[in-house]
Image: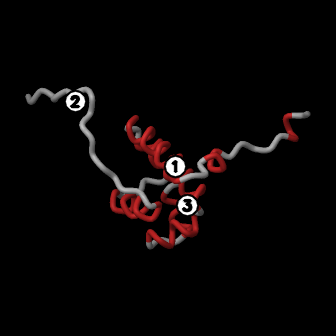
């Protein structure tokens, strides 16, 4: 089979259950990279249905695509609304390694 005949990989198709989506988001959040978190939210929103998430979060579908897109920089309030619309909540847990304190000059 030619590579050009292969179906394009869509990771959103593999996040079928709420548990899988939550586990994926937890892994990305633990890493702490803001761009990866934005991309993960985009992927999970597509897996659940971007229109439904946008409506539940109180934003337009187009606005959500833009906010969670490659050049998006969502505000924290938007992130919280999107998490809620997805049926998730953010929680805090103690890090295994204490963060280093910066020296005060």
Give x and y (percent) for residue 93.
Answer: 27, 41
Using residue 23 as the reference point, say whether residue 78 is left or right of it: left
Element type where label 2 sits in the image: loop
In the picture, the disc for residue 97 is none
Give x and y (percent) for residue 17.
Answer: 56, 52
Residue drawn where x is 19% and y is 27% of the image: 100
Using residue 95 as the reference point, say whether residue 87 is left or right of it: right
Occupied quadrant, residue 26: top left
Judge whether 48 appears above or below 71 on screen. below
Mark 1 vs mark 3, CA separation in Å = 18 Å
Give x and y (percent) for residue 6.
Answer: 83, 40
Residue drawn where x is 30% and y is 49% of the image: 91
Judge whether 55 appears above or below 26 on screen. below
- Front: mark 1 or 3: 1
Element type where label 1 sits in the image: helix
Q: Specify which label sits upstream in the sequence, 1 or 3.
A: 1
Residue drawn where x is 47% and y is 71% of the image: 56
Residue drawn where x is 53% and y is 60% of the image: 66
Q: Specify which label sits upstream in the sequence, 3 or 2.
A: 3
Q: Which quadrant would the N terminus be assigned to in this image?
A: top right
Q: Specify which label sits upstream in the sequence, 2 or 1.
A: 1
Q: How is the image coloured?
A: secondary structure
Mark 2 vs mark 1, CA separation in Å = 27 Å
Instruction: Please name the residue that numbered disc 1 is placed on.
Output: 21
In the picture, the disc for residue 99 is 2
Within 10 angstroms of label 1, few (less than 14), some, or many (20 or more) residues? many
Instruction: Please name the residue that numbered disc 3 is placed on.
Output: 65
Give x and y (percent) for residue 92.
Answer: 27, 45
């Amino acid at each position: 089979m030619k590579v050009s005949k292969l179906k394009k990989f869509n990771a959103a198709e593999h996040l079928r259950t709420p548990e899988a989506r939550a586990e994926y988001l937890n892994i990305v959040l633990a890493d702490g990279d803001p761009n990866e978190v934005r991309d993960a939210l985009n992927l999970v929103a597509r897996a659940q249905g971007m229109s439904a998430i946008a409506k539940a979060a109180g934003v337009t579908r187009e606005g959500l695509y833009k906010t969670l897109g490659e050049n998006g920089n969502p505000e924290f309030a938007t992130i919280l609304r999107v998490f809620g619309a997805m049926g998730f909540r953010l929680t805090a847990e103690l890090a295994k390694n204490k963060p280093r304190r910066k020296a005060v000059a």
